[in-house]
Image (cartoon, helix red, strand yellow):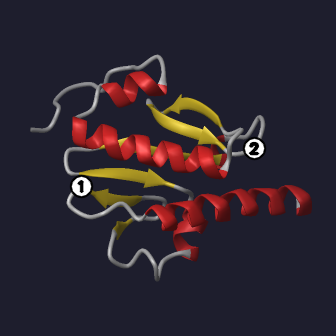
Amino acid sequence: MVKQGKMPTFETVDDYIRSQSVEAQDVLNEIRTIIKEVVPDAEELLNYKVPSYTLVPNGKRDHQIMFAAYAKFIGFYPFPTTIEAFKSELKSFKTGKGSIQFPFNKPLPKDLIRKMVQFRLNEIHDSNLNG
């Protein structure tokens, strides 16, 4: 069953995760853990009413990785350049310009998520050094 109506506003990422199905909560917490393992000082916040992680101090929106729960999948938003860099490894997942769908009926590609988070962090650092 899909939730109808306006999306609620949450105070914290914990509130957001607790409001989801048990199946979604498990996957959201796994992704959260992976992000924090790769970037321990990532700032956790809500952006567009979904969990977001700023990968560099005082980072702008394009320095964030986001995720969100849907009825049958978790949407993961690592930035378009990340998706392009990993397109061959992502071919078994539905992707968009800036999004990846991790369906509940497939194992979560934890190592791939780690690599994508690290790639995006390196890309931000490189652009800050060269920018």
Q: Amino acid at mark 1?
A: Phe
Instruction: Please say if 56 is above or below 5.
Output: below
Nearer to the camera, 35 or 69: 35
- Classify residue 51 as left or right of residue 61: left
Residue 47's disc number: none
Classify mark 1: residues with Cα within 10 Å, few (<14), some (14-19) or many (20+). Answer: some
Instruction: Please say if 10 is above or below 68.
Output: above
Residue 115 occupies which quadrant of the picture? bottom right
Image coordinates of residue 40 in percent, x first then y, are 68, 42
Image coordinates of residue 127 in percent, x first then y, are 81, 61
Nearer to the camera, 50 or 112: 112
The residue at which mark 1 appears reads as 104
Nearest to N terminus: mark 1 or mark 2:
2
Classify mark 2: residues with Cα within 10 Å, few (<14), some (14-19) or many (20+). Answer: some
Residue 126 occupies which quadrant of the picture? bottom right
- Classify residue 48 as left or right of residue 79: left
Q: Nearer the viewer, mark 1 or mark 2?
A: 1
Q: Residue at x 50, y 66 (%)?
A: 111
